[in-house]
Image: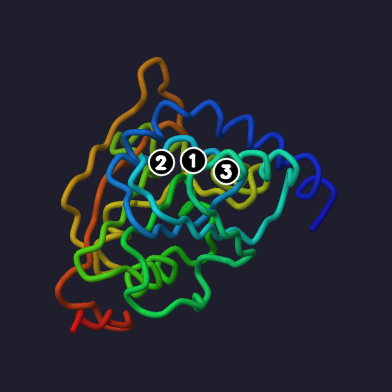
Amino acid sequence: MGFYQRYLFPPIMDFLCGMMSEMRGPALARAHGDVLEIGFGTGRNLPHYPGNVKTLTALDPMRALDTRVEGRIQAAPFPVVRKALPADGALPFDSGRFDCVVSTWTLCSVDDPGAALGELRRVLKPGGLFLFIEHGRSPHPGVARWQDRMTPLWRRALGGCRLTLQIDNLIRNAGFTLSEMEAFVPPGRGSFSDQQYRGVATPSATAPPGIRQTPSAP
């Protein structure tokens, strides 16, 4: 990891993530029970989880701003366990372990988002909820062309982040059913990076080929 990624990018990321706080509460409103969050980053989601969350297991291969993050963890009203793991590897959890899984502005930076979603589906209980808010490809052709042009530079500057993921297709192809999804651009914004997708998904009854099926509850 270079100097920029180790020392400069983390405070930039924390600042940018702070600008999106108003969108977190609606995305996390249905979180409950034992929750797995990928892309924990600097813990910006913690104040926005509702009171019926029992535990949070937080995954992120990058550990940064530890003093700041530890303060946020200590202020959380539920236990938080951090693990320095990538989301697209084989996760060390039993199938059906979690009531909810959460991804907020994370899939764009995962090397293999399809593999990550497949693992999230595996560790989610049957009937459990996948809660997400992600930015992705704009439905407007002119904006999408700018996203294509800007993505190579954007990825270098912002830790591998891609602007062009088709979020709904990714989630469906990983074996989820989208029960809710809202596509929107936040008020007062409108650049090539502002197309948002917020929603709720549940594991489909049948996993697609290559996706491990979560066993049904006995």
Of residue 81 and residue 149, the one placed in the foreground of this image is 81
The circle on residue 43 is 3
Q: Residue furthest right?
A: 3
CB contact under 8 Å: marks 1 and 2:
yes
**Mark 1 against mark 2, which lies toward the viewer?**
2
Name the secondary structure under disc 2.
Answer: loop
**Mark 3 against mark 2, which lies toward the viewer?**
2
Name the secondary structure under disc 3.
Answer: loop
Q: Which residue is mark 1?
A: 45
CB contact under 8 Å: marks 1 and 3:
yes
For residue 3, side relative to residue 169 (left or right): right
Q: CA distance from mark 3 to mark 2?
A: 11 Å
Above-or-below relation of 35 to 212: above
Q: Position of residue 91 (x, y in %)?
A: 49, 75
Q: Quadrant of the C terminus?
A: bottom left
Q: CA distance from mark 1 to mark 2?
A: 7 Å
The circle on residue 49 is 2
Q: Quadrant of the N terminus?
A: bottom right
User: Residue, x 20% and y 79% (percent of image)?
Assistant: 217
For residue 116, side relative to residue 27 (left or right): right
Q: CA distance from mark 1 to mark 3?
A: 5 Å
User: Residue, x 78% and y 39% (percent of image)?
Assistant: 8
Q: Amino acid at mark 1?
A: Asn
Of residue 54 and residue 159, the one placed in the foreground of this image is 54
For residue 99, side relative to residue 106 (left or right): left
